[in-house]
Each structure stands twice: as C-alpha cells, then as structure tokens.
Image: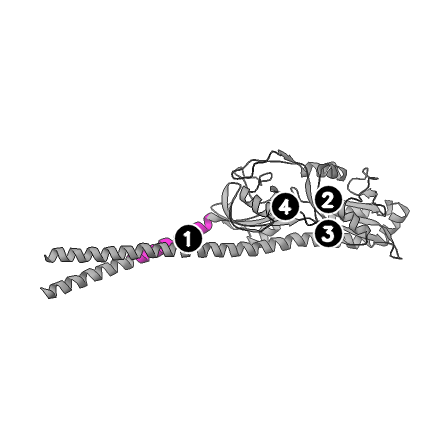
Amino acid sequence: MKIFTKTQLALIFLAVACLIGVVTSIIVNSLITNQIIFEAQERVKEDLNTARWVYASKIRDIDRTIHWTSIRHVLKKGLKEKNISPIRNELERLMAEEGLDFLTLVDRLGTVVFRFHNPPASGDNLLNDPFIKSALEKKEISGTQVLSGDELSKEGRSLTQKAAIQSIPVPKEKPIRKIEETSGMVLKSAHPILDFNGEILGVLTGGVLLNRNYEIVDRIKNIVFKDAKYKGKEIGTATIFLGDLRISTNVIDKEGNRAIGTRASREVYEHVLGKGLPWIQRAFVVDDWYITAYEPIRDVQDKIVGMLYVGMLESKYALMKEKLILLFFFFSMSGMLIALTVSFILSYMMLKKRV
C-alpha cells in the first residue's frame, strides 16, 4: 500500500510538473519569437530610413551639380549664341568628375541644343518631359524618372546596353511574360537657365542611370550592415527595383553574382506596388528568407515606378531564437527535476511519518 501511494504521488507531481513545463515552454517560445521578430523588424525600419536618406542624398548631389552649372555665365553665353565649343570640354570633364551619365542642354522651346554624352543626337524636342516642362516654367526640379528604351537610345548606345536586363526566374515571384527590361530608372535634375533680366534661355538637365549602378546600394550596406556575414553569406542587403525587377542590388545568387534581373516575391509585389504600402516583415529574397523592409519609389509625377529594399538574413535570428529556447528549456528542465526530486522526498517523508 505504501509503495502504491508513493508511486501515485510521484506520478501526480510528475504530470503537474510536465504540464507546467509544456505550457511555460509554449508561452516562452511565443514570447521569445515575437520579441526577436519585433526587434528585427524595428531594426529594418531604421535601416530603411537610412536607405531612403542615402537615395535622397544622391538626388541632392546631382541637383547641386546641375544648379551650380546652370548659373555659370559661360553656359548662358554659349546657349544664347548657340555655340557650346568654349565650355564643351569643361562640362564633359564635369560629367566624369561627378559621375553623371548624361548632361543635356535645351533651348527655351524645349529643343535639344547639345547632349554632352552623345553629341550627334540633338534637335529633338523634350517638351513632354516633365523635368524640362517644369524647368521651362522657371521651377527647379529633381527626382526619379523611368526612361523607355527609345528615350534611352537618344542618350547613347552605352546607356541603352547598360539598361537592358534579362529577367531571371526565381521562386515565389509573380509570373510575368516580359523576358527583357529595356527601360531605365534615372535620378535626374533640371534647372532653368536665365539671363540677367530673369528671362528663360533654356534648361540644363542631367543625372545618372541606376540600372547596374551599385553606388547607392553598396553605400547603404556599408553604412547599415558593414561587412557582417553569417556562414559566409552577407547578413544585410539592399536593392533598388524598377517595378519588381532588381536593377541594382548586393543580394548574391547561388553563382556568386549580383542577382540583377530577379524579381520580388508575389506578395511583396501586390502589397508595395499594387497597394502603395510599405512591407515590414519576412519575405523570400532570391533563394533565402529575409526579415525585410520595402517601400515604393515614386517619380516626380507621384507614380509608383519601383521599390527600395533592405533586409537581413532570417536564419541568423532563427538561430538566436533556438539558442534562447534551448537555454530556457535546460534551466526549466533542471528546475523541474529538482522540484520533482524535492517533492518526492517530502512525500516519502510524510508517508513515513504517517506509518
């Protein structure tokens, strides 16, 4: 009878301890998971703010260059006399120093007087270009623009070739029939050129092509993530999308190349490009899961034309969660064993006294 009673008590204590352990483990697992995910999402939010600042800083740099060039007397004189020779070499040197991919001079009617990056192409009219139209109304303007393949062809063959990107299928993307993207996303500025009486003489416009230009995304990564790696893979990445197509990225594919030409996942496409809302949660990026932040990129006409992205490898945080849960499990099991042992000893002593 004594043995039966001791066994009963031990089993009851064991069952209660196991129940408490299981319930506690479930609660702690949920708390740890939610807290780690929350902290990671808060971090990528901050990282996205930094990415936006870097992107906007590049636009400001371009705008500053175009502004200070547009007010130069020698440029005004050249435009008035339609003779660019005295300043041509200097402006070509300026393009190289400032990293501009194109620089164009337009008269008061919107007709191209000279393209410093492609001199043979001139005489076409750019009045339909929102940058030129705004500058001819004496309004300084800078921002993002998407140029079609035909528009890029006027800017030069090298830009057309640089912009062309073959689409590469990846898991979870939104199916699309377009095999090659020929359009280019540019950061651009346009400033009016005024005479001494404030009358419009023309417009100076210029900028950079983002397709296969890694300056911005690499600067974002260097500021936010440094060179941190996890199991040989970059922990943090940044990308500029044209639509849902990666045109500038430091996400690396399985072959060790930048994942240019791959697309965002369907759910990101529908949320960010379809609804115009930021995406701050996990997403499948090329070939792995990341904790991500995406937001729409809008052109100067407020049309959504692409996305800005930053993300961190989810596997690093999954490992952190596993370590915390295992640590908790070890201490909780140790505590349960100690409690079970003490309770068993106490129950034994109580039964012994009763006898």
Between 353 and 266, the one nearer to me in the picture = 266
Between 92 and 63, the one nearer to me in the picture = 63
Q: Which mark is residue 321?
A: 1
Quadrant assignment for the C terminus: bottom left
Task: Determine the secondary structure under disc 4.
Answer: strand
Quadrant assignment for the N terminus: bottom left
Q: Earlier in the sequence, mark 4 or mark 1?
A: 4
| Closer to viewer: mark 3 or mark 4 | 4
- Residue type at mark 3 is Ser
Using the numbered discs, state the Cα–Cα distance from disc 3 to disc 2 in whole angstroms. Answer: 15 Å
Residue 18 vertical position relative to residue 109 in the rendered view, above or below: below
Residue visible at 67% across and 44% down in the picture: 210
Q: Which residue is mark 4?
A: 306
Q: Which residue is mark 3?
A: 142
Q: Earlier in the sequence, mark 3 or mark 4?
A: 3
Q: Main secondary structure of the magenta part?
A: helix
Q: Earlier in the sequence, mark 3 or mark 2?
A: 2
Q: Earlier in the sequence, mark 4 or mark 2?
A: 2
Outermost residue toward the front?
275
Using the numbered discs, state the Cα–Cα distance from disc 4 to disc 2 in whole angstroms. Answer: 20 Å
Task: Determine the secondary structure under disc 1.
Answer: helix
Which region is colored magenta? Answer: 315-333
Mark 4 surroundings within 10 Å by alpha-carbon count, few (fewer than 14), some (14 through 19), many (20 or more): many
Q: Which residue is mark 2?
A: 101
- Residue type at mark 4 is Gly
Tell me whether circle 4 and circle 2 mark residues in contact (CB < 8 Å). Answer: no
- Residue type at mark 2 is Asp
Q: Position of residue 303 (x, y in %)?
A: 67, 47
Residue 316 vertical position relative to residue 181 in the rendered view, above or below: below
Using the numbered discs, state the Cα–Cα distance from disc 3 to disc 1 in whole angstroms. Answer: 45 Å
